[in-house]
Amino acid sequence: MLSGKKAVIFDMDGSLVDSMWIWPEVDRIYMKKYDLVQPDDFHKAIEGKSYTETAQYFVDTFSNLHRTVDQVKAEWQEMTVDLYATRVFPKPGAVEFLDAMKSRGVLMGIATSNDRTIAEAALCARDLMKYFDSIRTSCEVAAGKPAPDVYLKVAEDLRVKPEECLVFEDVPNGILAGKNAGMEVCAVDDEFSRPDEAEKKRLADYFIHDFFEIRDNTYERCRK
């Protein structure tokens, strides 16, 4: 998996840290507050979108939500920053993997669809910032996932070629973003995206249940 790789780039939510459980509850509370009705395709429609694109989706989709994109983003941030700082933890084996990569001189980056303030709250609380040479959000590039932009931006920061990067992602649109960037992708198991496991394995190059499987060489190589 790591052969020929100079850099490892992580999606954050659901891939590096166990945080996807936060958002369904945030959505439930927010929709109740403004009397919004969740569309049937809600989760698929926002999958991979940047924080800003998701706020724009809310403004465009819910005609009775009389809020601006910036107001929606600010409300979500207020609802979640403390949760990310106090109740979000790394995936099993993630810290050990980060230590191993750092000791080998492998460059590391974050390419997240989340808000920078929220992302940094989670990373700082668990002393993870020290591992990363680049942290980028999809709000800082032209388009969110499955567009490759955020992954290409991190690779540019790290001064490595896309083919020299290994990506860790937990949802299909994120996996597609890595593949569209010309990178190999390892899909990460997560409870939130488990119904999509077959699709994740179809799209990705590798699949892990936790990061210990890389150390133990028990990860799955996905058939193409």
Image (cartoon, grey):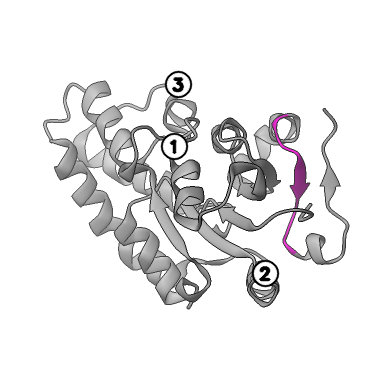
Label 3 close to label 1 by CB (< 8 Å) = no
Vertical arrangement, residue 200 with respect to residue 134, above or below = above
Quadrant of the snapshot with the C terminus: top right
Q: Residue at x 79, y 52 (%)?
A: 1
Instruction: Tell me residue 31's x, y (percent).
Output: 28, 37
For the magenta stretch, what is the residue range?
A: 203-211
Residue 221 vs residue 117: left or right? right
Cα separation, mark 3 vs mark 2, equals 41 Å
Cα separation, mark 3 vs mark 1, equals 28 Å
For disc 3, the marked residue is 40
Cα separation, mark 1 vs mark 2, equals 24 Å
SS at badge 3: loop
Quadrant housing residue 170 = top right
For disc 2, the marked residue is 101
Q: Residue at x 42, y 45 (%)?
A: 113
Among the two numbered marks 1 and 2 on one chain, the one whose residue lies closer to the N terminus: 2
Q: Is residue 133 visible?
A: yes
Q: Amino acid at mark 1?
A: Asp
Q: Amino acid at mark 2?
A: Met
Residue 219 vs residue 60: left or right? right
Marks 3, 1: nearer the viewer: 1
Q: Residues within 10 Å of mark 3 (few under 14, many from 20)?
A: few
Q: Is 66 a magenta residue?
A: no
Q: Residue at x 33, y 33 (%)?
A: 142
Near-viewer residue (196 or 129): 129
Q: Residues within 10 Å of mark 1 (few under 14, many from 20)?
A: many
Residue 9 vs residue 209: left or right? left
SS at badge 1: helix
